[in-house]
Image (cartoon, helix red, strand yellow):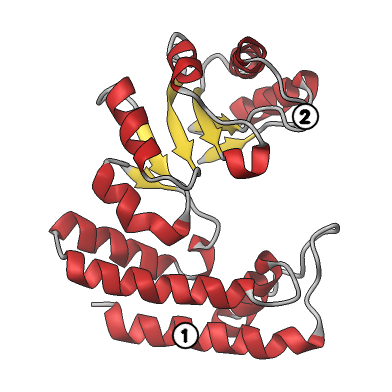
Amino acid sequence: MINHVACNNTKDSMELARHAESLGVDAIAAIPPIYFHLPEYAIAQYWNDISAAAPNTDFVIYNIPQLAGVALTQGLFAEMRKNPNVIGVKNSSMPVQDIQMFKQAAGEDYIIFNGPDEQFISGRIIGAEGAIGGTYGVMPELFLELDEYVKAGELELARKLQYDVDAIIYKMCSAHGNMYGVIKAILKLNEGLDLGGVRKPLAALIPEDQKIVEEAAAMIREAKENYLR
């Protein structure tokens, strides 16, 4: 269990980190501070302060520059590796090459997770030991099967399934409502789980989205029939 704890101020982030540690999570994770473009030494201090609030818990850097507005540079990563609690990176930057660069810089003692679900197999092949993704919850069996294909070297099957998974993701993203609202609606349809909707400011589903929900749900069911062993 990796608990994301970052807020846009250090005090609240440290409080969340302390709380996470009290619950016995395996690790905490944090994106960098957003909005203000801080120097790298300030970002490092922010992450280290959060880590210090949970001194007995591993720390995972969450690199998602396209949303946070701040990228994990090699220099910042080198600085953070001085903290013995830092065990790796969840890399959600779009270039797969970043996974290779972080892996080569840190060595085998660090874990690099692939972030973008649409490039799961690419990240795993180039060196990511695992992956963390937002769409796994709606089709976990398919991502587990993808991982098995990669480990078995069945790359043709892996690529075919990755394309089908991507088509499902694109379908879910085509709704007026937020993708996570679509995911919750699919889980109600496919799994009987009533999880409600999304919180504002995320956009709620509208009636016209129901067709997209049903199509995506059917695509997931079909993919399970086609690929699961």
According to the image, label 1 marks what residue?
A: 219
Regarding mark 2 in the picture, which secondary structure is present there? loop
Query: Is residue 101 or residue 139 the one in the foreground?
Result: 101
Could you tell me residue 32's position as x and y percent? Answer: 64, 28
Where 39 falls versus 211 (above or below)?
above
Please indicate whether residue 54 sits to the left or right of residue 16 in the image.
left
Q: Amino acid at mark 1?
A: Met
Between 33 and 54, the residue placed more toward the observer is 33
Q: Residue at x 25, y 26 (%)?
A: 108
Q: Relative to 174, is 27 above or below?
A: above
1 or 2: tag closer to the N-terminus: 2
**Residue 154 pos. (x, y %):** 15, 65
Residue lying at 55% horizontally and 79% vertically, measured from the top left = 191
Instruction: Work out whether 31 lies above or below 178.
Output: above
- Amino acid beneath label 2: Asn
Q: Which residue sits at x=52%, y=27%?
A: 72
x and y percentages locating residue 176 in the rendered image: 75, 76
